[in-house]
Amino acid sequence: MKDFLLDIREVLAKAEDVLTFALAGEVDLPEDCQVEGDVTLSGICRNIGGSMFLLEGKLSYVAKGICARCLMSASAAVEADFAERFARNPEDEDIFSFTGDTLDLSEAVRQAVLLEYPEKLLCKADCKGICPVCGQILNERDCGCTAMGSDLEED
């Protein structure tokens, strides 16, 4: 699956040439970092000379998982800036390598998604969580024992 391939033939010719792009697709992620739908990346690719290209743009996706407070399903829209360099035979390990006339952005996108993935997801900003005494999901109804639960935390 190669959803994040960018054909750069238009900007290979000379430095400072610019290509606008928009790509979307699936990203191979660990089980604890799931995404709903496609990850999208849009921006510009600039030939900065010496067979080096700078990509700048916006990365967006919807993170999905389990609410950190009540353990129900949760999701959050994520939008982040994206900036990466690509070069033929780069000497710097922070620069992605490419061959031919196509940039494979898959690994750069995967890394960006992982870096921007929320530390914890909430089903809603004011999620009340689970009662530590009886296990009732407090968003659904109050159980009446939460006051006793808060007394237990003081001990």
Image (cartoon, rainbow, N blue to C red):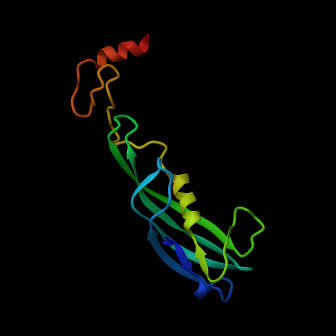
Residue 23: x and y in percent read 47, 73
Pick out the residue farthest to the left: 141
What residue appears at the point 45 percent right and 62 percent down from the top-left corner?
Answer: 60
152 sits left or right of 143 in the view: right
Pick out the residue farthest to the right: 91
Task: Tell me: residue 109, above or below residue 46.
Answer: above
Residue 53: x and y in percent read 65, 75
For the residue pair 139 and 43, the one nearer the viewer reads as 139
Give the quarter of the image for residue 36: bottom left
Say how many tags the image has: 0
64 sits left or right of 4 in the view: left
What residue appears at the point 50 percent right and 60 percent down from the top-left corner?
Answer: 28
For the residue pair 40 and 56, the one nearer the viewer reads as 40
What residue appears at the point 66 percent right and 72 percent down from the top-left corner?
Answer: 86
What residue appears at the point 47 percent right and 47 percent down from the top-left corner?
Answer: 32
The C terminus, quarter of image: top left
Residue 37: x and y in percent read 37, 62
Task: Tell me: residue 122, above or below residue 134.
Answer: below
Task: Tell me: residue 143, above or below residue 39.
Answer: above
4 sits left or right of 68 in the view: right
Pick out the residue farthest to the front: 1
